[in-house]
Image (tube, helix red, strand yellow):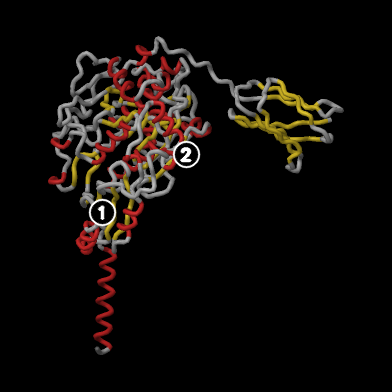
Amino acid sequence: MNKKSILLFITLFSTFLSLAQLAPKVRYWIPFKNKTGTPYSISTPSAFLSAPAIARRSAYNIPYHVSDLPVTPAYMQQIENVNHVEVMYASKWLNGVVVSIDSSAVALAALSAIKSFSFVLDTVKVKKIKLNKLPEINTIDAAAKENASSGTLSTVKYGKGTWQAYQLEVQCLHDRGYKGQGMTIAVCDVGFNDVNTGPLFDSIRNSGGILGTRDFVAGGTNAYQGGDHGTMVFSCMAANKPGFMVGTAPKAKYWLLRTEDGSSETLTEEYNWIRGAEFADSVGADIITTSLGYTTFDNPIQNHSYQTLNGRTAPMSIAATMAARKGMFLLNAAGNEGNSSWKYIGVPADADSICTVGAVDTTGALASFSSVGPTADGRKKPDLLACGWNCYVSNDGVQVFPGSGTSFATPVLAGAVACYWQACKSYNNMHLMDTLKKMASNAATPNNTRGWGIPKLCNGITSISKIEPEIDFDYTAYAHPNSNQITVNLNRTNFDKLNICIFDVSGKVVFNTEYSNIDYQMQLNTNGLSSGVYLIQIQTSKGQKNKKLLKL
């Protein structure tokens, strides 16, 4: 081969490699037949579930099931070893993995190798899909966007969130002290921009109310990206600036989970959500609220047809039902297709045992865009209604304004449900659902536009006792002159143990003792402590405080 031929060959080969690298990757869902060989066992759930998750199962007598076990690691490794194949992620509930194959050109050979494994059930291409239309913010003047740092807008403590809260009568629960304490809500959405900085969320951040974030789209733990739809959803529940805007569950704990990629349209989002729901279960979430839905694909042949809206066909709907079986209360937006030719709810709003939420305005008038039922197997949908038409939201934690969509009705109701469940914690999720329906405005004549209606929470709390406000932990401390004795006066004693540590000006620890016998007044004997200025630190389960201590 002459130099010219060699050069031409190298050029053509380089071009081929470049084109091969540019070829789009394709994704497939690989379901497995079993979990044979798994190193996990349902007899030791602590290996794959957190303590709060185990506590939920125990509280409601929910048995552990093989679906709780992680996918068999050896199966995943064998798939990973196939040329041109990368395992993207696994679903333990559906028992399978999503794989990425380098290109369509090598997919046939790769899939043939995968199908040869005895544990593989099938291969299903992950098709392109379109997300249900996200809610549109009403067109308003900039002056109508009111700023959280500009002062009080209303003498009512809920501020701009007043009527969407009052419609559900959640104030009856809040007035009795039930504001979501001890309840954990997982929020699955497209992104939570500015939740980590906006002043409207200062209270929830400073109190440790955001337990964590996960990004199931890009990977990692940063969900404060991807868009502000999740921010608006979150504001309906967690905003806490009295007189400006207060959400329906301002003292609940939250996990913020990014499961939707707003820049693309693939069925991957359904599997992302499944991963998010499995994660929410594993960390012990009580409630999952989702303001997303799926109906049509780029190729109409691949659509979620109305006939498949039976809760048992779409992977996301199957997983949603499984999540309910694990004891969580799921809420999902009905969709905003009521005015379209489609008009029906989407996926996973068709799932069994979950609460599908439609939208009304604050007067109770049904929003014309709110998607309707029934499901393909004849179940009534939506289940319940809340304000999602001119519902006040915030997209940055600074300004609030009216927005519309079942996306907002869903978290408004989710926060209220959290407070009600907090007050009735002996109810399991299905009893809770039944109770909410029975005290809703359309309970006598449920239908496929309004469902059971707007739940009226004041009706269900006549026997619920009031929670006395919790006193913040505090203390005073003083050293007795010419003595080794230091007196500490506590404002509360309802904690198991208490640790007292004293530091000198250099930061050296000069006294450190843990106490289990705790009284309102405690005497410390600090032999050898010379005169001077010290720092005393008292740490309890109710908080930690540091104060200056002067010894003469």
Q: Secondary structure at mark 2?
A: loop
Q: Position of residue 88 (x, y in %)?
A: 33, 53
Work out which quarter of the rendered image holds the N terminus and state it.
bottom left
Which is nearer the eye, 246 or 285? 285
Residue 145 appears anywhere in the view: no
Q: Residue furthest right?
A: 482
Work out which quarter of the rendered image holds the C terminus and state it.
top right
What's the residue type where badge 2 is placed?
Answer: Asn
Q: Residue furthest top?
A: 462
Closer to the N terminus: mark 1 or mark 2? 1
Image quarter of residue 454: top left
What's the residue type where badge 1 is placed?
Answer: Arg
Relative vertical location of residue 188 with respect to residue 9 in this rendering, above or below = above
Q: Badge 1 local density, few (<14 within 10 Å), some, or many (20+)?
A: many
List the residue tagged with mark 1. Answer: 27
Which is nearer the eye, 523 or 538? 523
Q: Position of residue 169 (x, y in %)?
A: 37, 16
Q: Position of residue 447 (x, y in %)?
A: 18, 20
Image quarter of residue 340: top left
